[in-house]
Image: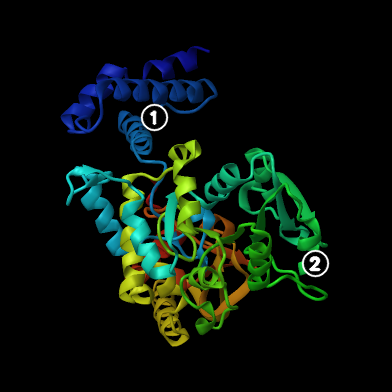
Amino acid sequence: MSDHNGALRQLPSVDRLLRQMAEEDKTASYPRGILVSTLRAVLSEARAAVREGGEPPEPSQLIARALERLERTFLPSLRPVINATGVIIHTNLGRAPLSFESILAILDTAGEYSNLEFRLDEGARGSRHEHVSELLRKITGAEDAITVNNNASAVLLILSTFAPGREVVVSRGQAVEIGGGFRIPDVLRQSGAKLVEVGTTNRTYLRDYEEAITPETALLLHVHPSNFRVEGFVHSVAIEDLVELGRKHGIPVVDDLGSGSLLDTSQFGLAREPMVQERIAAGVDLVSFSGDKLLGGPQAGIIAGKAKLIEALKRHPLARAIRVDKMTIAALTATLLLYLKGEALSAIPIWRMISMPLPVIDRRASRMVKLLQRIGIDAVKVDGFSTVGGGSLPGETLPTRLIAIRTSPPQPPVPELAARLRRMSPPVVARIEHEQILLDPRTIEPDRDKLVVDLVGAAAGGAVRRV
């Protein structure tokens, strides 16, 4: 016990550490209260270690521990990462990265007053929906549009506006669950609507819908199965036939597209995703889709369709609770302008990645492998596949070239190397398969290839830049 007491007395006081840090000009960046509490916490841990038989650390070691902890304290928990997984629309990594034009639009709008709800030509109050609706009319052919905070909210708003206490007919095969436990039947119940399922899981016919129609039927709902695919003995009703049935009975047809592509995905060797403008041309009354999936913009839920129905949505009390802010409108407007200009493929990141030619990826992978081998990393180029992700185009893949990394002592094992990469600044998120790390250049911005190589080298060598 006396030995412990002697060792404990060797530990410096908080005041001494503060003076030393001030002399070394290491205190200016942090408020005194947080600095003092951090030093006390570090000293408390040191005392506990000494009581367990450890050696008392030097003041410089205690200061280094405190500074490391302070750096973590003041680092935002939400920060940029490098997506090396090959999943283009990665839900856990923020889905679609924004275009340069969208980022500039946010910067321009966020730091200034704006005409969010003000008509400059009239000098009178306007609507925030006007900034996006005109563009959506031009791009999709819809009569009008409204934007809310995500597609789940869009579906909820539609059902709450037109179907509370009434029936909504949907194919049993489309009463689906998407990410995060969001289920179509649950949102129907939340809105007060009554679910009427027709057909079977794999086969639904037009007569199933028609036989279910009653005086209480408010909507015919079509849900695009964007995150799964049923194959084999299947049958579904074409949207054109459902529209004709709706018109016959005077019942609006609502199409929940989910991802909502504005470009033909089949040109890139993928399955053909239904396009928003095609659904509008087919005569659906309302179509809803996401802003941050295949559209490639910010998180938003977009509803386009008949003007009379859109106007009713705008007037519903729920619309204010789920409306988008000025920064979302700025980013979405900039994204839509890229489609209007015909620049989506070159300017919107997810479309650049989807359309990236395989020879380009191959050359990038070869360069990265050579650089990694030059610094002692066991890396080879292998064939592989990228996926679109984000609940879009299930089962569809794009051929790619992967950088496969194996490790051997003194380098850390593959799981530890992957963990170290996630602790780098910026973090690198990769795949682990067959006891090797896989990096897919398709989802890495080309100007970051060399940075990724450097980060792998630092992580493998143990020189991890912790954050």
> For mark 1, does the 10 Å Cα neighbourhood hold few (<14), some (14 to 19), or many (20 or more) residues?
some
Q: Where is residue 276 in the image (x, y as percent from the top left)?
A: 50, 68
Name the residue carrying label 1: 57
Q: Position of residue 316 (x, y in %)?
A: 49, 40
- Whole-number angstrom distance, CA of label 1 to CA of label 2: 79 Å
Instruction: Tell me which residue sits at (50%, 25%) in the image.
Output: 49
Tally of numbered discs? 2
**Residue 2 appears anywhere in the view:** yes
- Rendered view: 257 above or below 301: below
Where on the picture, by quarter, is residue 223? bottom right
Q: Contact (CB < 8 A) between labels 1 and 2?
A: no
Q: Position of residue 443 (x, y in %)?
A: 45, 69
Report the front residue among 438 and 211.
211
Q: Is mark 1 on a helix, strand or loop?
A: loop
Q: At label 2, which amino acid type do we have? A: Arg
Report the front residue among 57 and 307.
307
Q: Image quadrant for the C terminus?
A: top left
**Left or right of residue 168, residue 404 in this image:** left
Which marked residue is nearer to the observer: mark 1 or mark 2?
2
Q: Residue 207 carries which label?
A: 2
Q: At label 1, which amino acid type do we have? A: Pro
Q: What element carries label 2?
A: helix
**Residue 453 appears anywhere in the view:** no
> For mark 2, does the 10 Å Cα neighbourhood hold few (<14), some (14 to 19), or many (20 or more) residues?
few
**Left or right of residue 26, residue 320 in this image:** right
Q: Where is residue 91 in the image (x, y as percent from the top left)?
A: 53, 56
| Upstream in sequence: badge 1 or badge 2 | 1
Where on the picture, by quarter, is residue 244? bottom right
**Left or right of residue 85, residue 35 in this image:** left
Report the front residue among 119 and 183.
119
